[in-house]
């Protein structure tokens, strides 16, 4: 087993949203590699956000039942629970780094799980938060 990696909600959504085939295939490849190597980590927050986005906010939404099936599959990964100590760490993270509370909760969950990397399109790619590096798996094309 290799280094643990945390998946932010947006990467999961891209894996199931057909609007951008390039991002979809990249997200699917990342998920497949991490699940096969048993290094993928999610949080209860990410699974909840995923459910809302894929059932309400994409052009071809899933039904609640379809989303529940996908979440059951994703639940086979290492899923960090939400508890008081995680909320407190997220608040401290927000105060230290000035990122949103919700992003701080992602960072705190990744830190708790011992992840070396967070795959996210929303956080500052290349930045370290509590020793966890953010990587945007969908970098913009060169020259843009």
Image: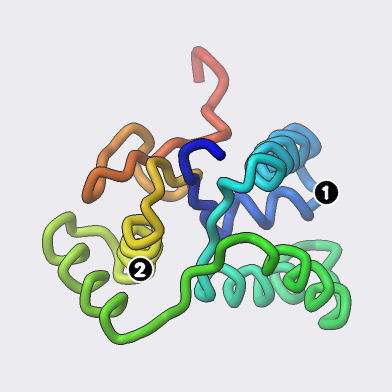
Circle 1: element type: loop
Label 2 sits on residue: 105
Label 1 sits on residue: 18
Q: In this rendering, is residue 53 above or below 24?
A: below
Across and down, in percent, residue 36 comes to 71, 42
**Residue at image location 63% in from the left, 60% down from the top:** 77
Q: Which mark is residue 144?
A: none
Residue 68, quarter of picture: bottom right
| In the displayed structure image, the side of residue 98 where residue 115 appears, left or right | right
Across and down, in percent, residue 71 comes to 73, 71
Circle 2: element type: helix
Q: In this rendering, is residue 105 above or below 127?
A: below
Q: Distance between the Cα atoms at labels 2 and 1?
A: 28 Å
**Residue at image location 87% in from the left, 81% down from the top:** 65
Residue at far bottom of view:
84
Question: Which of the two residues, 17 or 72, is positioned nearer the viewer here?
Answer: 72
Mark 2 touches mark 1? (CB < 8 Å): no
| In the displayed structure image, the side of residue 27 where residue 19 appears, left or right | right
| In the displayed structure image, the side of residue 71 where residue 120 appears, left or right | left
Across and down, in percent, residue 6 comes to 49, 51
């Amino acid at each position: 087993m290799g280094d643990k990696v945390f998946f932010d909600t947006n990467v999961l959504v891209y894996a199931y949203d057909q609007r951008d085939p390039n991002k979809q295939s990249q997200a699917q490849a990342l998920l497949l590699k991490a699940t096969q190597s048993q290094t993928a980590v999610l949080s209860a927050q990410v699974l909840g956000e995923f459910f809302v986005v894929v059932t309400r906010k994409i052009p071809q939404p899933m039904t609640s039942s379809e989303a529940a099936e996908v979440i059951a599959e994703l639940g086979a990964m290492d899923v960090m629970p939400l508890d008081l100590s995680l909320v407190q760490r997220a608040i401290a993270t927000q105060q230290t780094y000035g990122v949103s509370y919700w992003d701080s909760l992602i960072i705190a969950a990744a830190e708790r799980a011992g992840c070396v990397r967070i795959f996210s399109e929303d956080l500052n790619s290349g930045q370290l938060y509590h020793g966890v590096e953010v990587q945007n798996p969908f970098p913009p094309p060169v020259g843009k």
